[in-house]
Amino acid sequence: MAAFLYRMGRLAFRRRGTVALVWAAVLAAVGLAGMTAPAAEEEPFSMPGIESQEAFDLMEERFPGTAADGATARVVFVSPNGEKVTATENKKAVEAAIAELGDGTQVARTVDPYESGAVSEDGSTAYTTVTYKVDAAGLTDASRSHLDESLEHARDSGLTVEAGGDAMADMGGPSGTAEAIGISVAAVVLLLTFGSLAAAGLPLLTALIGVGISLFAITALAGPLGLADSTSTVAIMLGLAVGIDYALFIVSRYREERAKGRAAQEAVALATGTAGAAVVFAGLTVVIALAGLSVVGIPMLTEMGLGAAGAVVVGVLIALTLVPAFLGFWPNAILPRKDRKDRKDRKDRRAGGTPRETRKVNGGTRWASFVLRRPLPVLLAAVAGLGALALPMTDLQLGMPGDEALSTETTQRRAYDALAEGFGPGFNGPLTVVVDAKDADDPKAAAETVSERIGGTEGVVSVSPAQFNESGDTAVFSVVPTTAPTDQETKDLVNTIRGDRPGIESEAGATFEVTGTTAMNIDVSEKVQSALVPYLLVVVGLAVILLLVVFRSILVPLKAAAGFLLSVLASLGAVVVVFQQGHGADLLGVETTGPIMSLMPIFLVGIVFGLAMDYEVFLVSRMREAYVHGERPAQAVTSGFQHSARVVVAAALIMIAVFSGFIGDSDAMIKMIGFGLASAVLLDAFVVRMAIVPAVLALLGERAWWLPKWLDRILPRVDVEGEALTRPIGPEAEPAEKDLVRT
């Protein structure tokens, strides 16, 4: 592996113009495909294998053409000063507003609340549903403006008017603020790390090229494959983070080799052969973790994982080819200023000097020495700290936060609160019951029996009249719980109704299923929880095998997996503390606490595992390299920190900056993802990799690198540490001075 990448780096340096042109052509071709691709149609959320999805599919089959594919806006009217919305003046204002809402060019229909009974018992609140001919993505700016203007006109009458529904969702896409924050902080970190504008700018430039290629590719494939918007968001997030980091490691190793006195071409080849090998295997662990999301069986999660995995692959390829090519264009500008002053001295070293390496005492070596002197106390303190942070995980509650999680400054949240106050908390999350009476002697009697039995269940406020399909063999009715959609009592109610099913179906002579948004969220949460352990086994198992090949050790991969579990559990504990229990929520702008988004834990596990293995490979591969080249275990740990600690810290800070940028998003779910990822990287990089790893290696000593002889014989040798590079590989002649671009 190292020898192959060495030759690749040398070739990219020598053919830098060709390499740059090839990547420019790829960017142009993919960009053209993305810009000319038809807009992707919005695919409905699907979750195979759960009852609520099966019930929804049955509804689509038995009620053809009646599925509400169009966007909806639920407009809520609240009368002022204790008045009733049924009062003459208020009623006129509501009817005038409904008439104006119905004048929209894309509006299919509106519903009169006074005719449909959509007025609260105390008469203070009424609502209407505006249904559009197109989905939310198809709404024009004119239709959105018309909706906003109609709401403002209704408010002028003195009524409190708010609106929710998918028609009110912000369809403008990512604003780019999070990415801009991440790039800005990354630029500062890179500048402080390298002390050179060129060295700081090169990783940013190559990362942006990789993100551009990935984004255009996903855009081009979105239509044919039906990819969701979240696919590109996650690809941008991870593509930017790993793209910067992978280029950072190549550039850092290049500067290190130049500092030893090597000429530019040889330094590029060695950097690609050593740091590049670590990039390959770090990238593989990330791809395994992301592609492994497909085992969960959630289409949206699979799309997000594969899209992000593709962005990581692009980042790896750019780090191995385009970064060496750019180093060929600016071989000296990348170096620190002090190394560029005396060109004559460099020329003398290239001509006859022997590259030498001196051990510098820096922050990394000082910290490593500290840990090596006190490995057990450091290990116990780190594990105890992460364990304390992980404790709140035992209280983890999963759900799918809706409008109740939005800021009270949004009209959607105010509409949600007004409906809950006027009609009860369960009104915002009704259950939908689908009765399959195809085999019943009397379908209507069967549906009535199911309705009466469910209506008599404790925790049910009301049951709507059953609506039958044209064939008269399938009925649908709504069940309003007494509690809010995300309350545990609502989940218990769904389980109770389903638990009573055998008796109800036997009495009615028909079958039924429970669906609706609330039931769907409950089912999704249960499916994700049941899939988490198999997912961990698959991903961690494959990664341990990969690390076994890389490090040729039994204990190092097991230690890496254990450290990851500690960091991810601690980060999930931090998410629970802030977003579920509310501690420090105000600092992050979280106005409402509640269940953690169902997909959050498994999504966090997938991404963080890949990134954690990044740091493991980069840091421990330098220790393994030093050990293979003859250093004792303790010396190898110090060498690894001397060369990698500063760069790993910089890489972690960059990722934390990229993810933290999403904490400022107004969407509570995006905020949660950003906080979870940022805290996980912080804990993994600075506690697990910087404290637990050296402490464990110090305690293990020689045993850390033990591998049974029989296993050593059957494992493939990939030479990540660059042992083969200590032997002549190709022409030893360094490039002539004319081959180097003067800067």
Image (cartoon, helix red, strand yellow):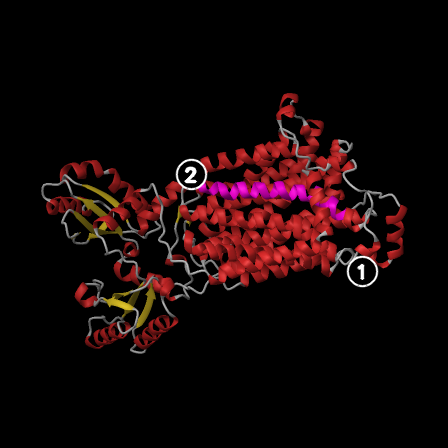
Above or below: residue 488 compared with residue 196? above
Q: Which residues are magenta?
A: 267-296
Name the foreground residue: 202 vs 152: 202
Name the foreground residue: 525 vs 191: 191
Residue 211: x and y, percent? 57, 56
Residue 742, numbered circle: 1
Q: Please tell me whether mark 1 or mark 2 is closer to you in this view.
A: 1
Residue 208 visible from this viewpoint? no
Quarter residue 718 falls in: top right
Are there few (<14), some (14-19), or many (20+) residues within 10 Å of tag 2?
some
Residue flagged by tag 2: what amino acid is it? Ala
Chief secondary structure of the magenta span?
helix
Residue flagged by tag 1: what amino acid is it? Arg
Name the foreground residue: 104 vs 100: 104
Question: Which residue is denoted by mark 2 in the rendering?
Answer: 531
Label 2 sits on a secondary structure element that is helix
